[in-house]
Image (cartoon, rainbow, N blue to C red):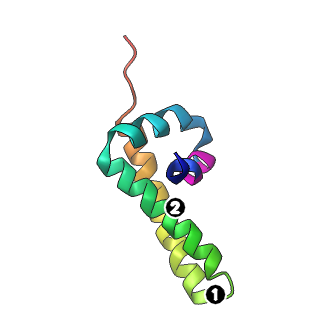
């Protein structure tokens, strides 16, 4: 589950849900992979302030989407 590792680090309190959704939901997997790619790219381009700013915005947007996804897919307890 290397591709979800950066998402798990960012949303550690949701680790179980991230692992479950990454394994079972293709849409969530794509979000996680996009997030991982953006985090990696921001590190690669760390010396280019404009690109880092662009990737930071993308990372923020993806974090919002991931959090919304996690909140909308919470297991219900009965």
Q: Which residue corresponds to mark 2?
A: 36
Residue depicted at 34% across the width and 37% down the height:
24
Q: Position of residue 77 (x, y in %)?
A: 40, 15
Residue depicted at 50% across the width and 72% down the height:
57
Q: Helix, strand or loop at disc 2? A: helix
Q: Nearer the viewer, residue 52 or 33?
A: 33
Residue depicted at 59% across the width and 75% down the height:
42
Magenta stretch holds residue 4: no
Q: Earlier in the sequence, mark 2 or mark 1?
A: 2
User: Farthest front residue?
Assistant: 1
User: Farthest top residue?
Assistant: 78
Q: Nearer the viewer, residue 32 or 78?
A: 32
Q: Which residue corresponds to mark 1?
A: 49
Task: Work out whether 77 lies above or below 45.
Answer: above
Magenta stretch: give its range.
6-10
Q: Position of residue 20 (x, y in %)?
A: 43, 34
């Amino acid at each position: 589950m290397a591709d979800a590792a950066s998402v798990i680090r960012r949303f550690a309190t949701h680790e179980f849900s991230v692992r479950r959704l990454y394994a079972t939901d293709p849409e969530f997997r794509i979000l996680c992979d996009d997030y991982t790619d953006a985090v990696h790219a921001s590190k690669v381009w760390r010396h280019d302030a404009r690109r880092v700013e662009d990737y930071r915005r993308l990372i923020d947007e993806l974090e919002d989407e991931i959090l919304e996804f996690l909140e909308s897919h919470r297991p219900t307890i009965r």
